[in-house]
Image (cartoon, rainbow, N blue to C red):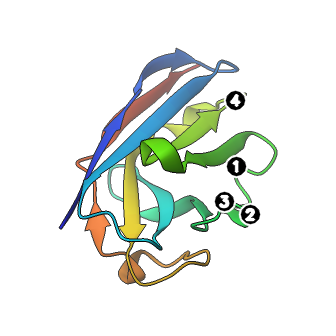
Amino acid sequence: QVQLVESGGGLVQAGGSLRLSCAASGRILSSIAMGWFRQAPGTERDIVAAISWSGGTTYYADSVKGRFTISRDKAKNTVYLQMNSVKPEDTAVYYCAANRRSQVVVVSAAEYDYWGQGTQVTVSS
């Protein structure tokens, strides 16, 4: 089992920045792809960004390209989502996810095996 714990959410003004962290613990396998998803009320859970195990490959949703950056610290088993120039439409619960079967980027929520509990991000206008 892998446990994921997100932190760093909160209230931020439009144009501001926020950094989310996702700490993984438990049975950490040698290859594990990670991703960040978000879900606003009444909507589906959508991919925000994803990163390969090596960190060499990343994926971003069009809506966050140029504003958000995903990174990982393998020594700390932690993945980060740096959110800059945030907008009110970024308001959502953000979830961290892990895929234990893939070393490459995974963008489909259905392919992730483990999920964190979520952290609320609210952007005020």
Q: Residue at x 28, y 61 (%)?
A: 115
Quadrant (top left/top right/bottom left/bottom right) for the N terminus = bottom left
Q: Amino acid at mark 2?
A: Gly
Picture coordinates of residue 123, whole percent (x, y):
52, 25
Quadrant location of residue 51? bottom right
Camera-side mark, 2 or 4 = 2
How far apart are the alpha carbons under marks 4 and 1?
A: 9 Å
Are the residues flagged by discs 3 and 1 in contact, CB closer than 8 Å? no
Q: Amino acid at mark 1?
A: Val
* Of the image marks 3 and 1, the number of the one nearer the N terminus: 3
* Of the image marks 4 and 1, the number of the one nearer the N terminus: 1
Are the residues flagged by discs 4 and 1 in contact, CB closer than 8 Å? no
Q: Which residue is mark 3?
A: 55
How far apart are the alpha carbons under marks 3 and 4?
A: 20 Å
Picture coordinates of residue 29, whole percent (x, y):
36, 70
* Label placed on residue 64: 1
Q: Amino acid at mark 3?
A: Gly
Work out whether 89 lies above or below 3. above
* Label placed on residue 56: 2
Are the residues flagged by discs 2 and 3 in contact, CB closer than 8 Å? yes
Which structural element holds mark 3? loop
Q: Which residue is mark 4?
A: 84
